[in-house]
Image (tube, coloured by chain):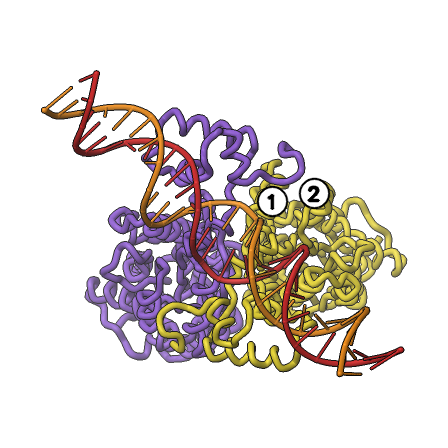
Chain colours: A yellow, B purple, C red, D orange
Amino acid sequence: MAQNSKKATINDVAREAGVSKKTVSRVINKSPEVTQKTYQKVEQAIARLDYTPDPQARGLSFRRSFLFGLIYDNVNTAFIADIQDGVLDKSRSEGYELVVHPCEHGNSQWIDEVRLLIDRLKLAGVIVLPPLSENPELVKMLKGVDCEYVRILSVPLDDDAHMVQSDDRSAVAQIADHLIELGHRNIGFIHGPKGSQAAAERYAGFSDALLRNKLKLLKRNLVWGDHSFASGVVGAHKLLGGKTRPSAIVASNDEMALGAMVAAAKLGIDVPSQLSIVGFDDEPQAAKIYPSLTTVNHNLKRMGQLASEKLAALCRNQPEQAAQVQSVICLDLIVRESTAKVPPEIQGNDN
Amino acid sequence: MAQNSKKATINDVAREAGVSKKTVSRVINKSPEVTQKTYQKVEQAIARLDYTPDPQARGLSFRRSFLFGLIYDNVNTAFIADIQDGVLDKSRSEGYELVVHPCEHGNSQWIDEVRLLIDRLKLAGVIVLPPLSENPELVKMLKGVDCEYVRILSVPLDDDAHMVQSDDRSAVAQIADHLIELGHRNIGFIHGPKGSQAAAERYAGFSDALLRNKLKLLKRNLVWGDHSFASGVVGAHKLLGGKTRPSAIVASNDEMALGAMVAAAKLGIDVPSQLSIVGFDDEPQAAKIYPSLTTVNHNLKRMGQLASEKLAALCRNQPEQAAQVQSVICLDLIVRESTAKVPPEIQGNDN
DNA sequence: TATATAATTGACACCGGTATCATTTAGGGG
DNA sequence: CCCCTAAATGATACCGGTGTCAATTATATA
């Protein structure tokens, strides 16, 4: 407790340094027009008084706060928490605190609600998470409002300054390649929700890999899910119920992959000796089951860091710099216990 | 977009309503001294102009912001996300936005850091999550600062207005009772980290149940862990390695219970036919494995809601009201597939 | 009906900063 | 050495609200 009782104001510093408060303000804002000498005088006074400027008062003048907003839909809490962690990492070091703001999914008013939030809190910038970030109406709104933004999504975009993209497509291709290398030819796929662009990207990656390896995409090997555990169970049952069941299943996310594993267990199909299963996301539980799940790691924290780094650059009015921050994140294939060579008795049994 | 271009200020409303801006301010703050008639005039003007007061400006005058802080240690992201969700639920309906602020664990400066955060953002209140909330230094700091607070923890406290407690002790007792009902007499326990009061409470519950049922607490049935998955694996190996291995294992949290399940699987011990396992927390993955995990549900979201409800009451200067909000939360036993009757061949094999 | 008292309302300073523009100081050329 | 121009600094209004206290109005009392 350096200060006596009240915290120092800019007037105290001005008095202490023997300058006007405007000059102190200049120092705080690193204005280049201040003399070296004056600068030091003020700096010392600031240090002596243990002064920190009041963000509220500054915000009132600037018509802008020192807050970032994190806008998300409350679907997957683990997902959010990790990104949030990364965002906090960078934003706080840049002098911004973070306001979190989940939106009711399905509530069509959410865009207006976000606008109101931005307006009222005078947010300096927002980071929008998928699937909200895919919404074109939102982007339209953000462009019309005095607030910077960065979108996190898995759909490629031609707007490096405002996006951090995880390259889901290549990652799923990688994962499919891994299975193909293990000898699998007959591979099932559990698709994500129909409206989701992210899910579409993941399927595209699967398709890429199969075509590149001259394998056919069989209709009977594709089932639809909605990224929920239950839909993974159902989907796997469908895939495994046919006469020529696939020797491997790729699920569009871990949640469904876990569902597939439970379905297999209940059907008495051993993973991985009789069936390989892969997921996508590397959720915490993926490593904590037996057999542990081969999947792909999102680097969520890193994405959060990059997003806030871009946002901070945008708020400094340096869009070029924001664009130069890495925009596309590659994911890491994580091979665990749920994948193995195709069992010999099935070997030739492909399409 | 109702407003023309700029948002309306209090002066605009005052002009529109034909009163002074101070009177408008009174209406905003629901001051009782305003006439019914004036009140309506102003309300209508506000509605016509689509006016919302500027929280920054109000905060500057009040020397207080309309922000709550959520202070946590970054150990378990799922845990945080759910509470955060509940906190947001209530706090936003009370007119507060939420700033999230993780603290580096191990960094001993964190209390000062929180003080600075409170000071700079002039937070109206903070909600502190365990294990941070257990720290007496923190509480001392919070009492010396002009900011309301609510602690979430699992240790009983005599301070209803400032705490939301989850009754871990009774819950673990319940879970042990469940096992005892199933015929288990020889029950192992994997303890949480040594410093943690929460872990101590859970063990106390276990002990309660055994003593109540006149079972002995055997030293060989207690191993220490640290709430991590890995320590669950190790702990279970120790418990299962002896000559008279327990027929059931209670882990102090789900994470370790999952570790125990993997350990059992690798040892070729079938769950639940040869070994029952229970966890604590009901993390999302608990239901998404086979066999699914019997555990206890935290009602994290509810805790978050109650905490923010209390905090809002405190901020309205109604401590009695805050104290009346439910303070102790009972947890729900969730029986799934990982527990079963004790196998007959072991039946008499107790202490 | 006049007056004392309480209930409403308004004028103005202030919260802690920044913007604008005038003023002072410093540097350079004649 | 003086004048001109540019750089550094300061005075004052203002951001959008609230607090204080005085001024006005309504109500109660005599």
Q: Residue at x 21, y 66 (%)?
A: B211
Q: Is residue A1 left or right of residue B170?
A: right
The earlier-in-sequence mark between 2 and 1 is 1
Q: On the rendered image, what quadrant is the N terminus of chain B found in?
A: top right
Q: Is residue A310 left or right of residue A207?
A: left
Q: Residue at x 75, y 50 (%)?
A: A244
Q: Residue at x 46, y 38 (%)?
A: B21
SS for callout 2: helix
Tag on residue A102? none
Residues at circles 2 and 1 in contact by the CB criterion of under 8 Å: yes
- Amino acid type, residue under disc 1 in the picture: Val
Relative vertical location of residue C11 with respect to residue B303 in this rendering, above or below = above
Q: Callout 2: residue from which chain?
A: A
Q: On the rendered image, what quadrant is the C terminus of chain B found in?
A: bottom left
Q: Quadrant of residue B95?
A: top left
Residue at image mark 1: A114
> How far from the left and from the top, in percent, is residue A117?
57, 46
Q: Nearer the viewer, residue B195 or A249?
A: B195
> How far from the left and from the top, in percent, is residue B110?
44, 73
Q: Is residue B159 left or right of residue A313?
A: left
**Residue A277 seen in the current view:** no
Q: Residue at x 41, y 52 (%)?
A: B62
- Amino acid type, residue under disc 2 in the picture: Met
SS for callout 1: helix
Residues at marks 2 and 1, CA–CA distance in whole angstroms: 9 Å
Q: Label 2: how many residues lie within 10 Å, few (<14), some (14-19) or many (20+)?
A: few
> How far from the left and from the top, in percent, is residue A179?
76, 64
Residue at image mark 2: A141
